[in-house]
Image (cartoon, rainbow, N blue to C red):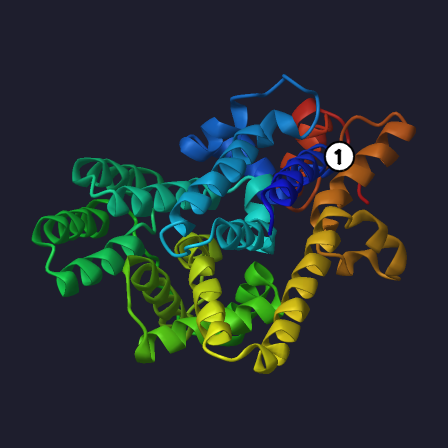
Amino acid sequence: MSRGFFYLFILLYTLALGYLAITLPIGPNEAKVFYTDTGVLGGLTHIAYGWFGNGLDFRLPFIFFGLFNIPLFFSISRAYFTEIEESYLATTIFALLPGIITSAVIVNIAVVVITLVLGFLLLHEKKQIVWQGVVMLLLLLIHDASVIFFIAIAIYFAFKRKIQLFYMAIIFLAIGLLYFNGLDIGGKPKGKFLELFGLYVALFSPLVFIYFFYALYRIWLREKKDILWYTSFTAFILSIVLSLRQQVIMTDFAPYVIVSVVLMLVIYYQTLYVRLPRFQGWYRWGYRVVIGSLLVFWMMIVFHKPLFYLLDDKRKHFAYPFYQPYWMMLELSEIEQNCYTSKHQKIQYQLKYHGIEKCEDIDVPKIHK
């Protein structure tokens, strides 16, 4: 990929994120965070509140982190590729992943965690031990499941005999387990293995996830294992183990798994370049199919609204929970009704953001829909 094409892509990508943030109504979890979260996540949703009069009011900080992750990832990829064009391509694929796009638009802690993980990996490459400790502390404070990351890097540092960093990781791991929530492993055991794989498919897109799985497995068998592989592989295996007994929260694991995109490109180029040009055809063809499928998923996310017209039952659309309360607000506005009582608290928060209060709160009879 050329430099000019890459910068054109970044421009279009930024415009697409802005378009999504403005046109997509507030979601159920976003509304709950906006009105109830008193931590870092809730604070971020109020930084730009009232500035734009649209979705950017609560999504702007997350778009900032999402765009900031692109140069961070590019900087890390330079350590893996000799040609800058290969880094451009790896960064483009990273930006196009469904999980990266949605994390940059929808209110969630994952996009901030990805920033910190990428920052840690970059600092580790530059051997900035003190700043690595600072990033560990920030992860501990903002992400309940940061123990996943501490387990991964502790294993890596133990194998590489980096004693100072190993002790730092162990200390933060102990603090996370003892004084913070850590991973939720309670409740009645119930298998969620297939559901987890469905979430990973949505995170990567189907074909990219298959290749992601293959790349991690191949590196495990016969390739050099670095801190990036240990981070992604450990998080991935832990998520599988936990899914055998409970539902896994994807935002706990996704930030540590998705950063391994660069490893997929490394394996692809290794597989491609060891063959003579006349035997590279099938690999290049497969690459085009995978990238094509990724672009299709990207287009479906950005231009998701017309898909409503193709479905007989709009509830089957993946964005329906975002639009339902918004449509209800429009209907209520037409009949000059300014209150509605929902059975679901998250929907009530969404309606509240659109200016529709709960009928009981303002002493107006309930309206059932």
The residue sitting at the bottom extreme is 279
Q: Is residue 237 left or right of residue 195?
A: left
Q: Position of residue 161 (x, y in %)?
A: 10, 60
Q: Quadrant of residue 38?
A: top left
**Label 1 crowding class (10 Å Cα cut-off): few <14, some 14-19, many 20+?**
many
Residue 104 vs residue 163, the one in the foreground? 163
Q: Is residue 320 left or right of residue 84?
A: right
Query: At 50% across and 33% down in the image, what residue appears?
Result: 36
Q: Is residue 293 left or right of residue 181?
A: right
Which residue is identified by label 1?
Answer: 340
Query: At 61% across and 69% down in the image, what residue appears?
Result: 287
**Secondary-structure class at tag 1:** loop
Query: At 23% across and 41% down in the image, what residue appears?
Result: 132
Q: Position of residue 232 (x, y in %)?
A: 37, 62
The residue sitting at the left extreme is 163
Quadrant the C terminus occupies: top right
Q: Position of residue 98 (x, y in %)?
A: 60, 54
Query: At 76% across and 43% down in the image, what residue appears?
Result: 323
- Counting every numbered tag in the picture gives 1
What amino acid is labelled 1 in the image?
A: Tyr
On the question of residue 345 being in view, the answer is no
Q: Is residue 262 left or right of residue 135?
A: right
Q: Quadrant of residue 141?
A: top left
On the question of residue 149 being in view, the answer is yes
Q: Is residue 1 above or below residue 208?
A: above
Q: Is residue 306 above or below residue 41?
A: below
Q: Is residue 309 above or below residue 116?
A: below
Residue 47 vs residue 295, the one in the foreground? 295
